[in-house]
Amino acid sequence: MHTPAPLAFILFVFFFYSQSYYLMPRYLNRRDWHKFIVTTGMLYMGAEVVRIVFYLLFDLEDKPMTALFDRDSFIFGAPAVATLSFNASLIYYMLKVFVVQQSPIKSVAKNSRHTQKQKVMMSDECLLLKKAMLRELEDHEAYLNPKLSLRVLAESVQARDKQLSFLINHHLDTTFSHLINSYRVNRFKEEAINGQSRHLSIVGLAQNCGFSSKSSFYRVFKAHTGITPTRFIDSLDEASQQLDQTA
């Protein structure tokens, strides 16, 4: 039996890592098995073609077929580096999948009931916290405070910052600032529509609704409604004039 060329030893490592860490994890499955065959063949044949061309260019062999079947061949050598690397990578990948990655399954199954109970408890806690937060915002109108922060609101509902943040982000699917600003924008629209605050300027009315500055109010209002506060007030005036004319 011939001993492989030194280049074959070097490429054995390349072939092994290419298949074990890229081709097999990505393509060795029921859906992409044909891609695995094609890419594996291209990997070996590509390296073999490069080797043959190198041999012909430097007159190490005079015929392509002779170079293909000599002792240095990656595919037809003795022993074949392609076969050795494929078998080694396949064994390594199977051990990795069925031994290493499957080992945590028992512990996960063992703790599944406990995890479900934790989720139920968490959902109950979040429900109570949500009710307390909505009561603070809607009944006590906490959003009218321009200095309202996540910590201040959390303290008012007797919760930690992280608990309230988790509730808003994951159960209400929004952010604290977006939630508070939505209450403030709706309050501004209600006050503008009922007309009881007509004596106030737009900025004055916005400040009464909890906004701390003109720039932030205009930016938030445009983001929530798609129009500027001035355009909104003008549309109310236009609607009022049309009603007066029809009357």
Image (tube, rainbow, N blue to C red):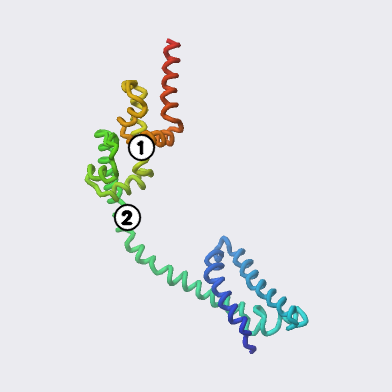
Tag 2: amino acid: Gln
Please provide percent x and percent y for residue 143. Answer: 29, 36
Please provide percent x and percent y for residue 131. Answer: 27, 40
- Helix, strand or loop at mark 2: helix
Residue 84: name its quadrant: bottom right
Q: Mark 1 points at which residue?
A: 181
Decide if residue 128 is in sight here.
no
Please provide percent x and percent y for residue 173. Answer: 38, 44
In the picture shown, does residue 52 fall above or below 35? below
Would residue 225 be found to the left or right of residue 79 on screen? left
Foreground: disc 1 or disc 2: 1
Decide if residue 47 is in sight here.
yes
Categorize mark 2 by other alpha carbons within 10 Å: few (<14), some (14-19), many (20+). Answer: few
In the picture shown, does residue 43 fall above or below 220? below
Please provide percent x and percent y for residue 191. Answer: 33, 25
Of the image marks 1 and 2, the number of the one nearer the N terminus: 2
Residue at coordinates 41% horizontally, 24% vertically from top-left?
Answer: 233
Residue at coordinates 61% horizontally, 64% vertically from top-left?
Answer: 35
Residue at coordinates 50% horizontally, 75% vertically from top-left?
Answer: 92
In the rendered image, the residue lying farthest to the right is 62
- Helix, strand or loop at mark 1: helix
**Residues at marks 1 and 2, CA–CA distance in whole angstroms:** 35 Å
Tag 1: amino acid: Asn
Quadrant showing the C terminus: top left
* 217 vs 191, nearest the viewer: 217
Q: Mark 2 points at which residue?
A: 116
